[in-house]
Image (tube, rainbow, N blue to C red):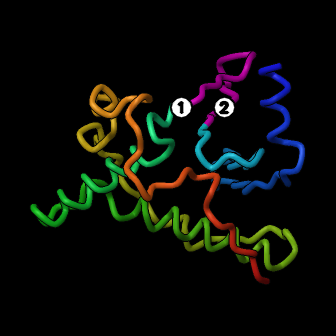
Amino acid sequence: LRELLKLAEFADAKPHGILIGYSDGLQAIALKLGNSGIRWDFAARLASQDAPAATSFRVGPWQNRNLFKALSHAIQHFFRTGVAPYPVERTLLTTCVLDAAMDSRLAGGVGIKTPRLADIHYQATETEPFRETGASWRIVTEETPQPEGLDSAENYVKLPVSR
């Protein structure tokens, strides 16, 4: 029964995704399946392995809200120190990819070339100090009631997408 309930989530959901082709030949896809806005999964096919590698990330108590603690921490760090917690190029690349994805959607799903992104490079930095590692989950547990006024993610009004 539990497996059937999991499958029911996909029954009325329209899957969609963003296919990204990198200049070095790597291909990636961000894929939305089902109706959940709080389920985070990852899979990859590695050249050194026959089977794909996959994992699922736990969002913690109160659904996705605890994950924003890391973002808040990073923003506070920036305001206090004036030092960006991670390279701004990372945000620029993400924003440009999403912009191209929206242009593609508006154009009926055609591929959008982004040669301007090929010249954006950065060195990854350690972001562990800003991550939610689950330590707060010992304080805010699954049994801890959400504060009044915090509705579940499923109760949010979904606005229609205009074209």
Q: Earlier in the sequence, mark 1 or mark 2?
A: 2
Q: Position of residue 153 (x, y in %)?
A: 58, 52
In front of the other: label 1 or label 2?
Answer: 1
Against 16, residue 117 (above or below) is below
Q: Which residue is mark 2?
A: 43
Regarding mark 1 in the picture, which secondary structure is present there?
strand
Horizontal relation, residue 140 to residue 93: left or right: left
Horizontal relation, residue 41 to residue 4: left or right: left
- In the picture, the quarter occupied by the N terminus is top right
Residue segment shown in magenta: 41-57
Against 48, residue 154 (above or below) is below
Q: CA distance from mark 1 to mark 2?
A: 11 Å
The residue depicted at 38 percent of the width and 34 percent of the height is 144
Q: Position of residue 135 (x, y in %)?
A: 28, 29
Q: Nearer the viewer, residue 105 or 87?
A: 105
Using the rendered view, name the quadrant where residue 86 is placed.
bottom left
Mark 1 touches mark 2? (CB < 8 Å): no
Horizontal relation, residue 25 to residue 136: left or right: right
Against 68, residue 6 (above or below) is above
Q: Which residue is mark 1?
A: 57
Regarding mark 2 in the picture, which secondary structure is present there?
strand
Q: Nearer the viewer, residue 50 or 67?
A: 67
Q: Residue furthest front?
A: 148
Using the rendered view, name the quadrant where residue 47 is placed.
top right
Q: Position of residue 48 (x, y in %)?
A: 65, 19
Horizontal relation, residue 78 to residue 71: left or right: left
Residue type (three-letter) at the residue carrying disc 2: Ala
